Image (cartoon, rainbow, N blue to C red):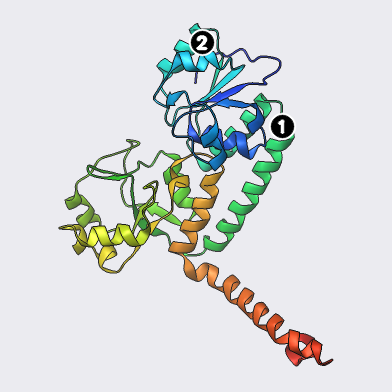
Amino acid sequence: MGRRVTIPAEIRRIVTLSPDLTETVYALGLDERLVGNTSECDRPAAAKSKPHVGEPQNPSLEAIATLRPDMVLASTSINRLETAMALERLGIPVYTSDPETVVGMLDSVKHVAELLGASKQGEAVTARLEERLSAVRARVVDTPMVHVLFVVWTDPLITIGQNTFLADALHWAGAESVVVSRQKWPQLSIEEVVRLQPEYLVFAGHGEETAATELADLRARAVWKDLAAVRAGRVVDIGEEAVRPSPGLVDAIEELARELHPEAFAEKTETRNLKMEIRLARGPMLESGKECSACVR
């Protein structure tokens, strides 16, 4: 970020200013050091019980200072440079993460872990996430890329640009945006969506709404209801994890890949069902002292 930060030798008290970094601290098992976060830090559920210092974009400097943090963690995805500079003037060091890709998110987890003296935990967490990402990649690598419209907001209609971690997350799930833009959060018209005709509409971060409620809402809207994707019911809601560059992003990638490429995951599901059928059939056979041919094989 072009800033120079002096890191304390020991970091025992942490305040996080973005939901993704709060989740990262919990993923590393360092939540006992977390003395404060923002009102939007709601994952995991335990994060809600921590003292809040306000909204990510306009936190209370007084509330942060009162918590006496050794380090404040911020993110370019949601926090402002002015906040970091103001805290530094108060003598509070601020470390900022800037993940622009999925791999960048993994690197951010490692960097935060190293910063907090927990390098081993960071390596363990990222190794598990990398393994899951590799498994998804292996499933979708030979499938055709699905063209989607990632809907960040409907009114006004806002989507994602190509240079964002969300666009990269789509690629990991075997998809790409129909919108090509250098802006991070471009706004477009519904007429442009009609021209582009995405194969799927992907929603995320809409609270309690599900794909079914999203679809019902779109089918009640003029123009939207005439989109081929809406008529065919190809609407996916992958939850709020997708809009945060944190370990939960991998959950969203896995879910999206299954929704867009069910055929790539069908074999594994069918094999699991077959094994379950054999196990259920095997029980009575064992009770009678016999073995079925399927189990022998």
x, y percentage for residue 70? Answer: 62, 16
CB atoms of marks 1 and 2 within 8 Å: no
Q: Quadrant of residue 211?
A: bottom left
Image position of 10 with respect to 40: above or below: above
Q: Which mark is residue 134?
A: none
Q: What residue is shown at x 52% (from left), y 41% (from top)? A: 43
Few, some or many residues within 10 Å of mark 2 (<14, 14–19, 20+): some
Image quadrant holding the C terminus, namely bottom right
Q: What residue is shown at x 48% (from left), y 17% (from top)? A: 63
Q: Is residue 200 left or right of residue 5?
A: left
Q: Amino acid at mark 2?
A: Glu
Secondary structure of the residue carrying tag 1 is: helix
Q: Amino acid at mark 1?
A: Ser
Secondary structure of the residue carrying tag 2 is: helix
Image position of 204 with respect to 76: above or below: below
Earlier in the chain: of badge 1 and badge 2, it is 2
Q: Is residue 286 left or right of residue 4?
A: right
Q: Which mark is residue 119?
A: 1
Task: Kindly report the distance in space between the C-alpha atoms of the residues bearing marks 1 and 2.
Answer: 25 Å
Image position of 85 with respect to 136: above or below: above
x, y percentage for residue 64? Answer: 50, 17
Residue matched to label 2? 88
Q: Quadrant of residue 160?
A: top left
Asked whether residue 164 is in view, the answer is yes
- The front one of 282 and 178 is 282
